[in-house]
Image (cartoon, helix red, strand yellow):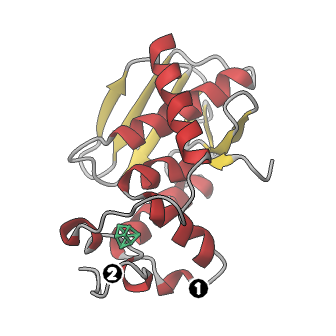
Amino acid sequence: MDDYIAIATLNDYIFCPYSIYLHNVYMDTDEGMYKATPQIKGTLVHEGVDHKTSSTKKTDIFSIHVYSDTLGVSGKIDVYKTDKKQLIERKNNLKQIFRGQIYQLWAQYYCMIEMGYEVKSICFYEISTHKTIHVPIPSEKDRTELVLFINKFRNYKPSEDVITVNPNKCSHCIYCNLCDKTDFNNVYT
Ligand code: SF4
C-alpha cells in the first residue's frame, strides 16, 4: 500500500502540488518546524476523534482506516454513524468548502463502500458553529472527475512541472519558510 495516495493530501495538492513534495521531504522532521496554527488546530480536531473524545454515542465509530484498491488511496475517516449510515468529516472552520475537501470526502466514501460499509449520506461538521453541511453522494460523473484528479496527482513530477509563486497564497502556506521557491516567511511566524 506504499504507493497509495493519502486522502488527507488531496486538498493540499490543489492548493499547491509542490507542497506535497515538501510534505514528503519534511514529514519525518519535527512538526513544529513547519506546522502553522491552522494545521495544529486541525490536528487537534483529528486527535479528538482518534482518542474518541468527540462523542460518547455507542452507535458512532471513529478513526477507521480506509483504503480503496480501485482508486489507489488510503486514509482515515473521522466518524461513521452506524445508525444513520452517515460519514462525517469534522473541520474547525469551514468558511468555504474547497474542491479538494470534497475530493477527500468522496475518496473516503468510495473507500468505505469498497470495504463493505453502507453509506447513505456524507457531510462536513463545522466544530466552531456546530453546523452540519450535507454533500450529495458522488455520481458516476463525480467519480470520473475524482479518478482524473488522482491520476494527475500520481503523475506529478516536481522537477518538471512549473510552480507558480503567488505571494498571497505562499504566505499562507505552512511550508513557505522551507520552500526553495520563495524567500519570504509565512503569516504564521
Ligand atoms: S510556498 Fe508557495 S510554492 Fe512553496 S509549497 Fe507553498 S504554496 Fe507552493
Q: For the point 35% across and 38% down, which residue is it?
A: 99
Q: CA distance from mark 2 to mark 1?
A: 21 Å
Q: Which mark is residue 84?
A: none
Between 64 and 109, the one nearer to me in the picture: 109
Kindly identify the amino acid type of the residue bearing the numbered disc 1. Answer: Asp
Of all residues, the one furthest to the front in this rendering is: 160
Q: Earlier in the sequence, mark 2 or mark 1?
A: 1
Of all residues, the one furthest to the right in this rendering is: 1
Q: Which mark is residue 30?
A: 1
Residue 166's place in the image compared with 110, above or below, is below
- Quick check: can you spot residue 88? no
Q: Does label 2 point to a residue whose CB lies under 8 Å from ligand 1?
A: yes
Mark 1 crowd level (few <14, some 14–19, many ≥20, 10 Å Cα): few
Kindly identify the amino acid type of the residue bearing the numbered disc 2. Answer: Thr
Kind of element beneath mark 2 = loop
Residue 175's place in the image compared with 67, above or below, is below
Give the image location of residue 93, x and y in percent.
Answer: 28, 52
Give the image location of residue 34, x and y in percent.
Answer: 46, 81
Q: Which of labels 2 and 1 is toward the front? A: 2
**Ligand 1 sits in which quadrant?**
bottom left
Q: Which residue is mark 2?
A: 182
Kind of element beneath mark 1 = loop
